Amino acid sequence: MALACGEGEEPTTPPDSGTSADAGTRTDAGTTEDAGSDAGQPTEDAGTTEDAGTDVDPGSDDAGTTVDAGTTTDAGTTTDAGTTTDAGTTTDAGSPTDGGSGDAGTGGETDTDGGYTQIRLMAANLTSGNGQDYDPGHGIRLMAGVKPDIVMIQEFNYKSDSAADIRSMVDQAVGPGFYYYRETGAQIPNGIISRYPIVESGEWTDAKVSNRDFAWARIDIPGPKDLWAVSVHLLTSSSSNRNAEATQLVGYIKGKIPNGDYLTIGGDFNTDSRSESCITTFRQVVDTAGPHPVDKNGKDGTNASRSKPYDHVLVDSDLRQYQVPTVIGSSTFNNGLVLDSRVYTPISEIYPALNSDSGASSMQHMGVIKTYRTPNF
């Protein structure tokens, strides 16, 4: 999130923001029309004292514009998961007729021995320009260049935010047929994009900010365990607020996610250092120890100036044991990649990304990628 994760007025909650599955949970009841859209409402990210919307480049002009979420056509799922009666049925997020999903196609990069599946996870707050959206195309090209299997995405806006536009963005960024979940009624929504079926999804209320929540999805990866992905966009305002958000999120995770499944928390934490209190709090549910991803020059910062570790992909100990190097073309990143196209060579390895994409006007952050090889048995 970095440059523009502002807080403003509470966005209008659309009627399809859904039933409550657990305390603080909002799920998509499945309508395609978003009658309570916030289209035309005042901007949600106008540089308030809570979250001014500039995390690395004070004075950035990306604060204050709202293109979101909650336009007249809801780009979320149509029969979404996360209702009290939903336990991951086939009608859930991910059916071919679902406005927020599609046919997963080939189903991943399964190793030739048939015993393991390689899964590339990515945290992506890669919007650029003045609208906190992916319209300019820089972030789309960056995602397409590294071919993630699962993306925990922030500021998930594109064009009109209709189901057709979001579908088009997902197809361009990761490939036709990927599933996705996008929270509704948010100015700068979080979401999850997945190669594998999303069998349950929803959002947990972030009590510290009004223009987005914590988006989560239960993903049916190959093998006996599901992978739960949580997409977060913590506040820029203070480390104490970020720790309060982390404490709240840990509570949701402990109340919902089975210990036996895999867990990843990814996204824009806006953390000034890896020793921040929110990172310590997250240790209750994920492994935060290094070594950490770096770019081609061995640098790990993910904000625009590359000085702070704003963005993270964290996993629980069950999944951490299966981490493997991230290999792109002839390049190997033993601990994962911080994607800065300005220093990536040869740039042809991450086509269609351009060298200039990570330096685009008001580009939020650098992407973070880690890879895991999980057993299918």
Image (tube, helix red, strand yellow):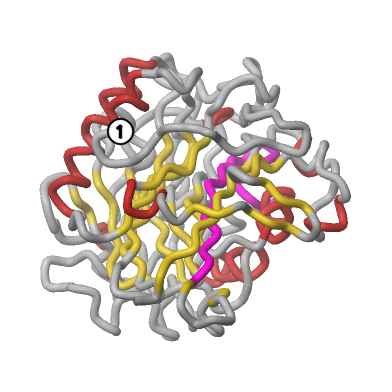
Q: Quadrant of residue 304?
A: top right
Secondary structure at numbered mark 1: loop
Does residue 133 appear in the picture of this structure?
yes
Vertical side of 222 occupied by 247: above or below:
above
Q: Amino acid at mark 1?
A: Arg
What percent of the width, then of the height, locates residue 361?
75, 34
The residue positioned 54% from the left and 64% from the top of the image is 149
Confirm whether the magenta stretch covers residue 131: yes
Vertical side of 242 occupied by 89: above or below:
below
The residue positioned 40% from the left and 70% from the top of the image is 375
Quick one: 241 or 27, which is closer to the camera?
241
What percent of the width, then of the height, locates residue 135?
67, 52
Does residue 186 appear in the picture of this structure?
no
What percent of the width, then of the height, locates residue 31?
31, 71
Confirm whether the magenta stretch covers residue 18: no
Quick one: 228 or 62, which is closer to the camera?
228
What quarter of the picture does the C terminus occupy? bottom left
Q: Quadrant of residue 252?
A: top left
Is residue 8 shown left or right of residue 357? left
Task: Judge the density around disc 1: few (<14), some (14-19), many (≥20) Cα neighbours within 10 Å.
Answer: some
The residue positioned 42% from the left and 58% from the top of the image is 182
Which range is magenta? 117-137
Question: For the stretch drawn in magenta, what is the main secondary structure?
Answer: loop
Is residue 155 shown left or right of residue 17? right
What percent of the width, then of the height, locates residue 287?
36, 39
Quick one: 109 or 341, which is closer to the camera?
109
Vertical side of 39 occupied by 340: above or below:
above
Which residue was labeled with disc 1?
283
Is residue 262 shown left or right of residue 112? left
The residue positioned 40% from the left and 41% from the top of the image is 232
